[in-house]
Image (cartoon, rainbow, N blue to C red):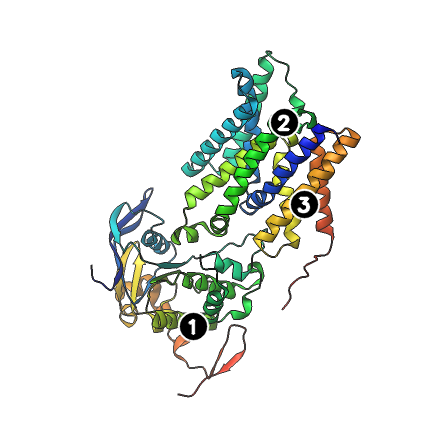
Amino acid sequence: METDCLVKATDICINFGERHVLQHVNLTVQKGQIVTLIGPNGAGKTTLVRIVLGLLKAQKGNVVKPADLRIGYMPQKLHVEPTMPITVKRFLQLGGRIDSAYIGQILQEVRISHLLDQQLRAISGGELQRVLLARALSQSPQLLVLDEPAQGVDVAGQAELYQLIGEIRDRHNCGVLMISHDLHLVMATTDEVVCLNHHICCHGRPEQVSVDPSYLALFGKKEAQGFAIYTHHHNHRHDIDGGIIEKKNG
Amino acid sequence: MADFVLRALIAGMCIALVAGPLGSFVVWRRMSYFGDTLAHSSLLGITLGILLDINLQVAVIACSLVFAVVLIFLQRKKTLSTDTLLGILAHSTLAFGLLILSLSNIVQVNLVAYLFGDLLTIGTTDLYWVIGCTAIIALLLLFLWNGLLTITVHEELAEVEGVAVGKLHGLMVLMIALLIAVSMKIVGVLLITSLLIIPPAAARRFAQTPEQMALIASVAGCLSVGFGLLMSYELDTPAGPSIVVTACAFFLVSYLTPSLSGRRTQ
């Protein structure tokens, strides 16, 4: 195994009853690399991620990762039990690191410092995604595993979130494995795209995948032309509270 | 104050103290039916204890713990929905217990005391059992608190972060089983779960953190036991219902008072 290889899954197969959910899937994440899994609903994306994390055992194939690999995991959804009072700070402390300075630093990194003492139940869906990202970061991860990080976030916010994930990768030099529905929103920050529909349809650089016949067959031409929503330029952007941030020159 | 009241009071307070945090988990994890099932099955322990002529407290504790292990095992199999599974087990064990008890006319058993709790039945040995068992639970809760809370918020996240989810979940169920087994004589089989549920529910509105909720629940539980036993002593009412009615009154008061902490608006 190469030294920069964080996780290497080989020939993964799993069936749920009669359904072949994953067939002969290979996946590698290197240090400093962002790998995005895309594919339609029910394509086995989350299943693959669960196998990589060790939450689920593949029926065939194996996953190799260093025994001491620190993983920061951001689950698809966090159901906040209405009967449980818990602040953002306390939630982050449950990750194992309890010193306030450290928590504050992470919150600043994902730009939600103002939420520190808020109840987890009282914050918005987009804010909750950032709290989950902060929890993943609290593990000082070598590998970040993000299951649909942009779920429930509006389009402008999604672009900003993916940009943030790119920044995090640059700063921590960690590997990132994430699931996304939408290739075009993640193109800018992704190194490698793996298009999954029970088996790997195609993989490669995002601009290669977006013109790959098997990708087009899976998502259709219309979706593939959706570049427009992404390539126009804003003269400002919004912070998480919706305030306008003027674009810096340069 | 009569000795037996003092014994019941001390025992009740010990139970209420650990029922606060443990009950909070029952509320957060939506395990109230789970508690009921364990409680109902503990009657089977009484029956077996009488039939085999062994110490009843030991029989109840053993039976509850064995049953808890069976429940954990069945839950992992995921063959039936937990709700249905618990429904079947809760009532069939209760029925079995009652049936065997009525068929064996070896001794005349005061069934009502076991179903609804009886102050007069708390002997010195019972008190030691309660103190010992609740002390064990309290220590476990103290040491495992963070882990238990982590698996309650999100099990898979906890597992990825290296928390022993299965072990902690098992221990939590065993703690609940143990607490139910020792509090049976005071509160009674049919009402035990309410002591786990109502104080945390009453505490919910005044808490900002899980720890506050657990602590307030303990205090509310102790007050319920105190006033409940006082009522039982003065009015000669059964202990269990008196405690539960008091706890319920606390819940209503907390529900109807405007939130003291003030809603955080920003």
Q: Residue at x 41, y 46 (%)?
A: B164
Question: Dot 3: few (<14), some (14–19), or many (≥20) neighbours within 10 Å?
Answer: many
Separation of residues labelled 2 and 1 (CA atoms): 68 Å
Judge from the rendering whether residue B206 lies leftward or rightward of residue B90; answer left or right.
Answer: right
Left or right side of B165 for A191: left
Asked if B56 appears above or below B32 in the picture, the reply is above
Q: Where is residue A180 in the image (x, y as percent from the top left)?
A: 38, 63
Residue A60 left/right relative to B24: left
Dot 3 or dot 2: first in sequence order is: 2
Question: Which residue is depicted at the point 57% across and 52% down?
Answer: B210
Query: Residue B18 in the image: x percent, y percent?
Result: 58, 41
| Foreground tag (3 vs 2) | 2
User: Which element is circle 3 on?
Assistant: helix
- Amino acid residing under circle 3: Ala
Q: Where is residue A27 in the image (x, y as percent from the top left)?
A: 26, 58
- Residue designated by label 3: B220
**Considering depth in this image, is B37 or B238 the residue closer to the camera?**
B238
Q: Which mark is residue B124?
A: 2
> Which type of secondary structure does the marked residue at label 2 adopt?
helix
User: Residue beneath label 1, please?
Assistant: A159
Q: Mark 2 lies on which chain?
A: B
